[in-house]
Amino acid sequence: MEQRPLQRIKTISEFHRLRGLPPPEHPLISVVDYALVKRPTAIGEVNLVLDFYQISIKQGMNAKLHYGQQVYDFDEGVMFFAAPNQVFNIQPRPSSTTERSGWILLIHPDFLWSTPLAGTIKQYEFFDYAVKEALWLSKKEEATINGIIQNIRQEYQATIDAFSKQIIIAQLESLLSYAKRYYHRQFITREKSNHDVLEKLEHLLADYFNADDLAIKGLPSVHYVADQLNVSPKYLSNLLTVLIGQTTQQYIHEKLIERAKEHLSTTQLSVGEVAYRLGFEHSQSFNKFFKAKTKQSPLAFRRSFG
């Protein structure tokens, strides 16, 4: 497979220069008008790494973006989040008359230094979502987000004083809180696609636990399940938490306990044999896991059917 060139952009000033933009008004934070961004005509498909956060709403991108193992075709406007040091693969398409609009908010980690957001920004897991899990906004929601972006732009364009950074940080926190709210809404309103994921997850785990080689494969991991469903691990866990009140790990454990109870109540397999069939290397680990989840040992559960 051909190795694509890797382009690393370390500073916001460098991003502006490479995209044909005027120098940023602030070296550590910038709101870019997407319609003004220029892509070098000589450059083809490229892997891109940024050393800063990127939040954007883009329309008319006229390119396919690979992010992790996912591909998204930006023909419609969505809100997208990316943390530093994540690799993008951009495939330009033949030029078209599509009008571009939107904005890109660039935030260098140094801007967050010595503020509470420097630590808490890692709690906003949508920075790790796949491209196809971008946030779809209603017109009203987009207007709210655009208002915050305008406030941020006005603040760093004004005369910098002792309050400027604090005010911008408060605006960023507000933007991230709204995004969290809107993602929660998206989990609920995209009912069909989300329930398709649940149904596929149910079948996936049933097939996994029915397999004869479970003792060799071991227990299914969250990453394995997410890969099989073609979603990012954090998106899947957050989706399940909203829809059924359980993380992916908790859901896997619930299905595992259901299968363990089935073996213990309907077969003559020893506890050690049940543990082995369910992918546990040691029966002691199975005993501890079963008791932690059910408040009784496997033998005590079996005797209740005696």
Image: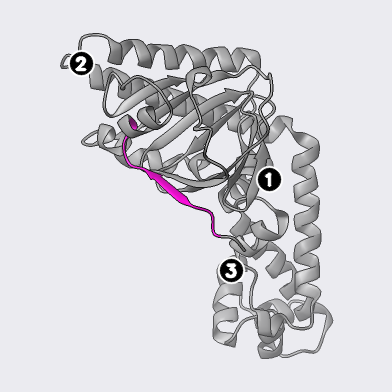
Q: Indicate the position of residue 109 as horizontal and vertical percent values.
A: 30, 38
Q: Secondary structure at mark 3?
A: loop
Q: Which mark is residue 235?
A: none
- The first of marks 3 and 2 along the sequence is 2
The residue pinned by badge 3 equals 295
Amino acid type of the residue that numbered disc 1 sits on in the rendered structure: Ile
Residue 297: quadrant of the picture: bottom right
Residue furthest right as drawn: 266
Is 189 in front, or is 61? Answer: 61
Q: Quadrant of residue 168?
A: top left
Q: Could you say which is closer to the camera, residue 117 or residue 244?
A: 117
Q: Earlier along the polypeptide chain: callout 3 or callout 1?
A: 1
Considering only vertical position in the picture, is 92 above or below 161? Answer: below
Residue 244 numbered mark, or none: 1
Crowd tier of the residue under label 3, counting other residues whose Cα lies within 10 Å: few below 14, some 14–19, many 20 or above = few
Give the amino acid type for the residue marked by disc 2 in the picture. Phe
Tell me whether circle 3 and circle 2 mark residues in contact (CB < 8 Å): no
Depth check: give the residue in front, 76 or 262.
76
The magenta span reads 3-12
Residue 179: horizontal and vertical position, in percent?
52, 28
Q: Position of residue 47 (x, y in %)?
A: 51, 48
Query: Label 3 amino acid?
Result: Lys
Mark 1 neighbour class, 10 Å CA radius: few under 14, some 14 to 19, many 20 or more: few
Quadrant of the rendering where the N terminus is positioned: bottom right
| Left or right, residue 160 beside residue 22 | left
Give the mark toward the camera: 3 or 1: 1
Query: Residue 163 shows which numbered tag?
Result: 2
- Element on which disc 1 rests: helix
Q: Is residue 54 visible?
A: yes
The span from disc 1 to disc 2 (Cα, nearest Å) is 43 Å
